[in-house]
Image (spheres, grey):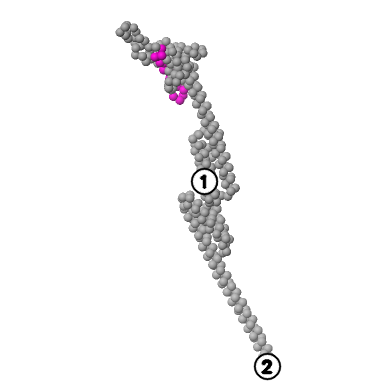
Amino acid sequence: MKEAFKKHKKVVVFVAAIIIIVICCIAGYMAKIKYEQKQEKIRLDKIETTNSKIKKEYDDFTKEEEREKKLELLKNLAKEADEYGKSDEKFDICEKEYLNKIDQMKNYFIEDYDKTIDDISAKVGDINSFNNKEDLSSYVTDLNDLKTTIQSEYENYNVIDEEKFNTYSNTIDTTVASFNDRIASIEKEEEAARIAAEEETKRQAEEAARNLNNGNGSSSSGNSNYSDSNSGSSSNSYSGESSDSSSSGSSSETGSSSSSSNNDYKYEIWIDNGNGKEYYYQNGNGDIYDSNGGYIGNMNGWDGE
């Protein structure tokens, strides 16, 4: 009987021990769950705090209107992201959020680069058909300024990488070179047109003077109008006048009469070259002068006279 009691007592003790172990395990497991839950809450709080900070700095960036201040905000956020990545306590989700917001900030400037280039390209269109030299010069200045801006923001704020910077530089250099070539071409065309217009004006003056010499060269006074059928739309008018008041032939005390020399006569020539009338004149000796008194030639020395 005594032995049966001892045996029963051992069984009770064994069961109690198992129960205690089970209770301890359950308690330990529950404690672990609570600890993990607490740690998870701490982790989530830290993530939320970091991401909220990132969001605030990005919102400040979007609200800022001054370019330089935007660049500084980008630089600061990039610095924070670098420091966060080196810290012992960091979370992948926060690192990704840093990179995401930094990329969005950089895209603001990249889109500005692209818009400037695209707008200029759209205004010019076919470069070989664009004839506004002043606008092209202005666009060259704008593109060179843009290149300077891109280089500064690449070097000081890391807005783009080296490969992207080289791409922008090559694009701008090629575009500027084509604009400068077109400007040079326009200037050559303008110079050729100017020379042709001067030659045509001189030709019309000489032709009108020949006609005057043949038709009205003997007149010493009065005005005459003449239209040359060979000069197209040119309109020429001539007036023969004496600049010497003694041409009326007044007598001196000795009874001798004075008269003006051929050099005193002036035949006015007005030629319409399409850009307005230009003034020439011929004296009685057949000498032709432009409006500034520049000598052109003598009627009597020309061929065909």
Asked whether residue 286 is drawn in magenta, I would say no
Q: Position of residue 191 (x, y in %)?
A: 51, 28
Between tags 2 and 1, which lies in front?
1
Residue pictured at 53% horizontal, 50% vertical: 156
Three-letter amino acid code at the position of disc 1: Thr
Q: Secondary structure at mark 2?
A: helix
Q: Is residue 143 above or below residue 53?
A: above
Which stretch did the figure color magenta? 262-276
In which quadrant of the rendered image does the N terminus lie?
A: bottom right
Q: Which of 28 and 240 lies nearest the eye of the viewer?
A: 240
Could you tell me residue 26's position as x and y percent? 60, 76
Q: Which residue is mark 2?
A: 2
Q: Is residue 284 left or right of residue 128?
A: left
* Spatial CA span between label 2 and label 1: 102 Å
Q: Earlier in the sequence, mark 2 or mark 1?
A: 2
Bin the neighbour count of mark 2 within 10 Å (Cα to Cα): few under 14, some 14-19, many 20 and up: few
> Is residue 266 shown in magenta?
yes
Q: Which residue is mark 1?
A: 149
Q: Are marks 2 and 1 in contact (CB under 8 Å)?
A: no
